[in-house]
Image (spheres, coloured by chain):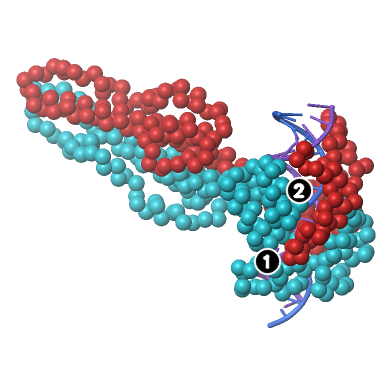
Chain colours: A red, B cyan, C blue, D purple
Amino acid sequence: MNHRPFQDNMMFIPQLYPADAPYTQIIAQQGESKKPKRRRGKKNKGGENGASEANRKRKLSAEQVNLLEQNFGNEHKLESERKDRLALELGLDPRQVAVWFQNRRARWKNKKLEEEYSHLKKSHEANLLEKCRLETEVLKLKDQLSEAEKEIQRLLESGDRVPSNSSSSSQSQSQSQSMEAVDPAFFGVFGVDGYDDDVFYGPETHCINALEWINLYM
Amino acid sequence: MNHRPFQDNMMFIPQLYPADAPYTQIIAQQGESKKPKRRRGKKNKGGENGASEANRKRKLSAEQVNLLEQNFGNEHKLESERKDRLALELGLDPRQVAVWFQNRRARWKNKKLEEEYSHLKKSHEANLLEKCRLETEVLKLKDQLSEAEKEIQRLLESGDRVPSNSSSSSQSQSQSQSMEAVDPAFFGVFGVDGYDDDVFYGPETHCINALEWINLYM
DNA sequence: GCTCTGAGAGTAATGACCTCA
DNA sequence: ATGAGGTCATTACTCTCAGAG
């Protein structure tokens, strides 16, 4: 406020403006009267339901919005008939009703996008974990297989000489559905938020990278 | 069009709107006094780069937007000093500059969200495929392991009696990094768009479900 | 064709609320 | 506690396009 000498009620001088720019300026010009300026006005804080009608506003009243919302729920599109009827009921210009619907559709689209985003994110995380688990399991299985083959090799070679099994310790539980190779602590990383920009979502990340990704991104 | 008698070339007079007030209300109330109505004006169609002069309405001019955009590129926030300077340079109300920045930030946020969404989606798809592949591989490995163990069993039992290997055919290439269990045709599903609502992103989907998901969702 | 209309994207502006300094 | 600026949500308007008459 200090570096704005006179601005309490704004006095905007229209002559300053180039003729080229339309409308916006005009609005600015007629601001010489009051220019709402920012009224810091202790709005109704806790009790809000009234939605404040006393003040000159350009917001639709709660009932109006309710009815509109209800209608929107039934059908997002708006045929002229419905539009006119609604306008009459609400005491609004049909144009306003149309505008309201358009804006509502836009909002709806956005909300949907966000929902899907978070959905997708959750799913993605779960998949990363799953992938990690599977990678671990693949490694484990390969290891076991390797062992088993070594064993076979050994058995074949020493074939009829040594009938006793020397080191067959790792294959007994290999078939089980254990799948518990992932440290449960990994789940702890969820719940952190505030992600950074430009994280690379590499599809080829390995287990470790996946975890780093989660740490970074989640 | 019947209920809108005259609207020939429209002109749209902003001064109609009272400075500080009802605005909506006024529009709403005098439903019969034909407010602005809209458009009809043969805009420049093909020629687009100009995009600024023909239209007599608000919207900042191209240069104004350029300068603002440039400034926004440097820094998304706006200190009063910069704001006032910009306002002066552009011949705008400082308030307008502030508004522009606010709206710009909002737009930016949205765009970022969308970008991240598509990024994430790609990544997710890739991961699904990867998961599918891994699941297949796990199955394959388990199978091989099972075979190997059967073989071992056989060898141990028939131990010193039959030194010849009877059916050891599947474990020779098991260690390789082949990993080519996924039909390359799967990649063909990408490129289809127009997704449906409310797809369930199950984290526990198996390979087949994952593919169905892709078909549904992508 | 041409006009009118509604939809969707983009944008300007406002109101309410929040947060620091 | 006041006020400048910020975010969010909303309202309104512009422009472009596609379809109906």
Where residue C10 sits in the image (x, y, percent)? 65, 57
Q: Which mark is residue B95?
A: 2
Which residue is rendered at x = 30% and y = 37% of the image? B140
Q: Chain of mark 1?
A: B
A167 relative to A57 in the view: left or right: left
| Residue A187 appears left or right of A25 | left
Q: For the residue marked with disc 2, what is the amino acid?
A: Arg
Residue placed at 29% from the left, 35% from the top? B141
Q: Residue A146, located in which quarter of the rendered image? A: top left
Question: Is B27 displayed left or right of A19 in the figure?
Answer: right
Q: Chain of mark 2?
A: B
Q: Position of residue B113 (x, y in %)?
A: 58, 45
Disc sitting over residue B4 in the figure: none
**Residue A197 x/y as whole percent:** 52, 40
* Numbered disc 1: secondary structure: loop
Picture layout, residue B135 above or below residue A33: above
